[in-house]
Image (tube, rainbow, N blue to C red):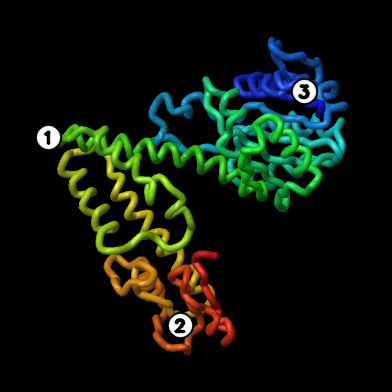
Amino acid sequence: MYKIGFIGLGKLGIPCSQVFLDRGYDVIGYDIEHREGIETKESIKSCVEDRDIVFIAVPTPHEKEYDGSEPTSHLIPRDFYYDYIKLVLVEADKYMNSNQVLVLISTVLPGTIRKELSPLLKNTNLIYNPYLIAQGTIKEDMINPEMIILGGEISFTKSSYYGIVLTTLYDDICGKKVRYEMGTWEEAECIKMFYNTFITQKINFVNMIRDVSAKLDYTNPNVIADALAKSTMRIMSERYMKPGMGDGGSCHPRDNIALRWLSKKLNLDYDMFGDTMKIREKQAFTRAKEILKLGNKVYFSSDSFKENVDCTDGSYSLLIQHYVKKLGGQITNSDDCDVFVKVHQGDNVSRYDLFKKHIYDIWA
């Protein structure tokens, strides 16, 4: 069994290290404060030098006023504080080698490892392995995770040395049922951050149902929320989780516009649906700029809002075309184009690939 070291024995480090300890692994730890529940060493050196795997679980805090227990939206946005991680990484790296697996489980923003942390290392390669756990159920969440996230410098694979070590470890802790999501540092950082913030958006949306219901008669928010929670075809499913075209059709955009009006009429103090439509439009504007970098004469494979239908109501393709024209581009319906835009995933692009046209595939 692997010998494991844990640097940082706080709210995350203690329960996580105890999971490995309970499974029979040789586990030691280090923290600047005295901790109970695990054998501790007096220095980082003595915690890492004979270990197969070293986990770093030190905090990445904000200033106190940024924790969300008081209003924060008026404050200047701030990144996490990384000095604790940097100090630990530099010290651990002095006494480790490339055969040891150095694993960071603390939360960091996308881009942080490559820009700020990896350059500090001379002897080891850092693996990013953020945990999806909640206070109060840390051990349970670690043993029964929704997924194990693993990120490396270029990518991360099960067949690599580090992949074999860590998947062997987690297969033993979690069982063969565990789902692995592997990629680059940035991809792992993004999965962690967008997972958490997705939950925030979901909760905000459900609580808006409550706010709207409170302003209407004969409306129980739980009836509405329960109906949506059971909608496993589109809402609670993998559908619409492919980055690409924005939503369209005769319902979706107009429903957001109408609910924005209702929110204002009901005197809600926020404009979620207005922000939703602004984001939709900003994203279409960004797509238009990306297209025009490839050429000025643009052919769109379809004007319809959905594949295999003729309806153009609320078409996201037409919205992007609006911005292409606004930015000085030309929409053409002929093969004499600079750029071919693949609107739907099933649209055939082989003809334009043959003609050596620039193909803009929003789904790629």
Percent position of residue 43, x then y: 81, 19
Q: Earlier in the sequence, mark 2 or mark 3?
A: 3
Near-viewer residue (333 or 350): 350
- Which amino acid type is marked by label 2? Lys
Q: Is residue 269 visible?
A: no
The first of marks 2 and 1 along the sequence is: 1
Query: Which residue is at the front of the view, 245 or 118?
Result: 245
Residue 50 image point, x, y percent: 87, 26
User: Quadrant of the rendered structure where residue 250 is?
Assistant: bottom left
Relative to 171, 11 lies left or right: left
Q: CA distance from mark 2 to mark 3?
A: 63 Å
Dot 1: what SS?
loop
Left or right? Give the position of 242 relative to 117.
left
**Residue 152 drawn above or below residue 251:** above
Q: Which residue matches tag 3?
A: 25
CB of mark 2 within 8 Å of CB of mark 3? no
Q: On residue 297, which mark appears?
A: 2
At label 2, counting other C-alpha atoms closer than 10 Å, the crowd grade (few under 14, some 14-19, many 20 or more) is many
- Relative to residue 5, is residue 200 drawn left or right? left
Residue holding disc 1 = 217
Measure the alpha-carbon separation of dots 1 and 3. Answer: 59 Å
Position in image of residue 127 (x %, y %): 72, 41
Name the residue at the left extreme. Answer: 217
The secondary structure type at the circle numbered 3 is loop
